[in-house]
Amino acid sequence: MFKHFFNALDILEKSGSVDSAFQYADTLESQWDHDDTMKKLAKYFARQGRISETSRFTAAIRDQISHIHCLHEVARALRRKGYVDPGRRFLQDAYEKVGLLNADPMDTAVLFLVMSSELYDAGRAEEALTLLRRAMELADAAPGSAGASKFIAGCSGQLASWNHAEEAKRVAEAIPEKWFRDVALKRLDKSAS
């Protein structure tokens, strides 16, 4: 998992060339190894505030979902390091791309949930709420009610943490699987007291 990332860092350290590290990562045959290494390198450069390198490695990620995950993770890393404006740009890019995503409903729902949290933390509460609601709609329509019920229970908790207690309770009461519904309602009752 980290082998290729460390190899790329070793190449970067020995050669001093970002291009050489990029070429190494770009030649990895497995898409998973390629995308994972590009993501790790993008985050590495983001933590250093090296925006152009961050953009280059992020743009090289081939899988659409991995690319969007990287964008929001880079946005978070930049924000935490004080690079607020570039972080906002990466977050906006992720937000625009997630809105166009055409993938498995549960994969998309998970990505919407993650993005909603990042948007909320960035002060974009209304957009976060909209994306969270879309995540719940996708999960509700997905086959396999146990996984969807668990996911929606988590979303209910997220709503409650964002001070939308009434909506959180309505969502929890509508969870199809009884066990997850009961757990979600107990958590909401506990957090309200």
Image (cartoon, grey):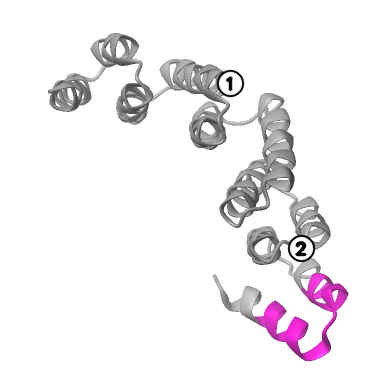
Which contiguous range is marked in magenta?
7-24
Q: Residue at x 54, y 37 (%)?
A: 118
- Neighbourhood count class around disc 1 (C-alpha, 10 Å): few under 14, some 14–19, many 20 upward: some
- Secondary element under disc 1, as helix, strand or loop, is helix
Q: Is residue 143 above or below residue 74?
A: above
Snapshot quadrant of residue 24: bottom right
Q: Quadrant of the C terminus?
A: top left
Which residue is situated farthest in the front direction here? Answer: 82
Counting from the top left corner in percent of width and height, residue 89 is at 74, 40
Choose the circle earlier in sequence order: 1 or 2: 2
Q: Is residue 155 above or below residue 91?
A: above
Q: Residue at x 75, y 58 (%)?
A: 54
Q: Residue at x 63, y 53 (%)?
A: 82
For the image shown, how many numbered marks are present on the structure? 2
Q: Is residue 157 above or below residue 71?
A: above
Q: Residue at x 83, y 88 (%)?
A: 15
Q: Is residue 5 left or right of residue 55?
A: left
Q: Amino acid at mark 2?
A: Arg
Counting from the top left corner in percent of width and height, residue 141 is at 46, 15
The residue that mark 1 highlights is 127
Q: Quadrant of the N terminus?
A: bottom right
> For residue 179: magenta?
no
The residue that mark 2 highlights is 50
- Neighbourhood count class around disc 2 (C-alpha, 10 Å): few under 14, some 14–19, many 20 upward: some
Of residues 88 and 19, the one nearer the viewer is 88
What secondary structure predominates along the stretch shown in magenta?
A: helix
Snapshot quadrant of residue 26: bottom right
